[in-house]
Amino acid sequence: MAYKQQNYLYTSDQVRTLDHLAIEQGEVSGLQLMQRAGNAVFDYIVKHHPGAPITIFCGSGNNGGDGYVVATLAKKKNISVQLVHIKPPQRLKGDAKLAYNIAYETGVPMTSFSQDIVLKSGVVVDALLGTGLKGPVNSNYYSAIELINKSNLAVIAVDLPSGLNADTGDVGNICVNAQATISFIGLKQGLFTAFGPDYCGTIIFEALEVKSSLFDDVHPPSVKLQLNELLKHIKPRKPSTHKNNYGHVLVIGGDYGYAGAALLAAETALRTGAGLVSVATRKEHVSAIVARRPEIMAHGIDANEPLQALLKKASILIVGPGLGQSKWSKEMLIAALKTNTPTILDADGLNLIAREKIKLKPMNSPYILTPHPKEAARLLNQNTTEIQNNRFAAVKEIAKKYQAQVLLKGAGSLVCVSEDSAIGVCVAGNPGMATGGMGDVLSGIIGGLMAQGVDQSKCLPLAVCLHAEAGDMAAKGRQISLLPSDLIEPLRQLIG
């Protein structure tokens, strides 16, 4: 049960279903659930901001009801509290109305929203909009969020920051910028990808004592990836083992000016455990690659025939790092796609497929595609905004269109290994990884894992987690100066 609650991610409709089931079957009323939620928020404030005055912005739904509970608790503890309601409380219904009545009877100071409200000190509680928001924020809600964000005070979001789409992580026209978000019953998948990480701050989960049996029939569409669980798929090596037990990765790329990308992918594949690694690149780059990493077998390829010999020896292909989009690039890609060798496609490998409308032939092992949002947009003939508006839908659509395993990179990278499985969400990683070459390192990790025989369905999620965790270890609070090659030593520590 603990795993379900902490790591399973749900849509807003599913969380509402769980909420209703808890009320119908859990011997708890809606008001009691609301009071538990309010208590969780209040306890967090008391722990992290002891004695600070509290200003609570309440909307007209159950999210606002949670805010009225927080206000009641603050008043009872003689903590300075001010409640700002966006809509007249008389319009409240159900449990939110009951929570308002209790706050009113307790003597909580309340005022209607005005743009003249001044926020000078203390903590702000965002209880404006719940999980039902699907479009832009309108009228006084917009003005209230604008006021909250301009205050520069610590903001605690109730369930999710107002303005954030709980299902997709998309933000319309405005969103509360929270220091912490306290989410209830089931974690919402939109908190962890797209723009969710920009606005949520620290995410705290509160189960509200909901019975574990209620989760049995509500199947999560996504799940947080856990590195510790995935690492077990890298098997210990026997003393009698040898290099040929761990595959031969061939990196195809490195057009003029882009040798570094192919080198990063190749070196990382070695560091991840591949038995042998070769690079097929421009002949002008061979000496530089060998000088940097003599363990890599670098080959200059100007004609198709020498590449065929390399393709026959390889057990895993990585096509795209520094590949470019020249005639040479296209010839290299086409030759690789004619094989039946498991293939990772990245960078210009993906761009060429989209530009030339190349169809991937069926293989026993699925292709692995690793687009960032702009590459994903090309693959689906969309724009980047459309991809980011619903990353979950995009990763599924790419997987279906190309019959492939797909990684959609970005904040909260998404992994789709099959149409039937839950989408994996990587919650590690940091903004310092937004630099050229990080994707090449990731491709190398995937190739190294595949080459040594890690389970086909686990390679991609494991690689994403290793890459992100190595990035966090390498950054250590110094994100801006982070380089892709900085990840190699932490990667060695993680793999062993």
Image (cartoon, rainbow, N blue to C red):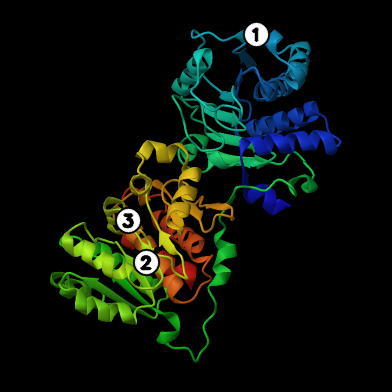
Circle on res. 350: 3
Identify residue type, mark 1. Answer: Pro
The single residue placed furthest to the left in the displayed view is 284
Residue under circle 2? 444
Q: Which of the 4 image quadrants contains residue 449?
A: bottom left
Identify residue type, mark 2. Answer: Gly
Q: Are marks 3 and 1 in contact (CB under 8 Å)?
A: no
Residue 423 horizontal/vertical position (percent): 55, 52
Q: Is residue 160 above or below residue 483?
A: above
Asked whether, in this view, residue 202 is left or right of residue 483, the answer is right
Q: Nearer the viewer, residue 141 or 333?
A: 333
Query: Between disc 2 and disc 1, whose residue precedes?
Result: 1
Residue in the picture at 78% in, 37% down: 21
Residue 92 horizontal/vertical position (percent): 70, 14
Circle on res. 88: 1
Q: Are marks 3 and 2 in contact (CB under 8 Å)?
A: no
Tell me the distance, in whole angstroms, between the alpha carbons under discs 3 and 1. Answer: 54 Å
Identify residue type, mark 3. Answer: Leu
Residue 329 horizontal/vertical position (percent): 21, 62
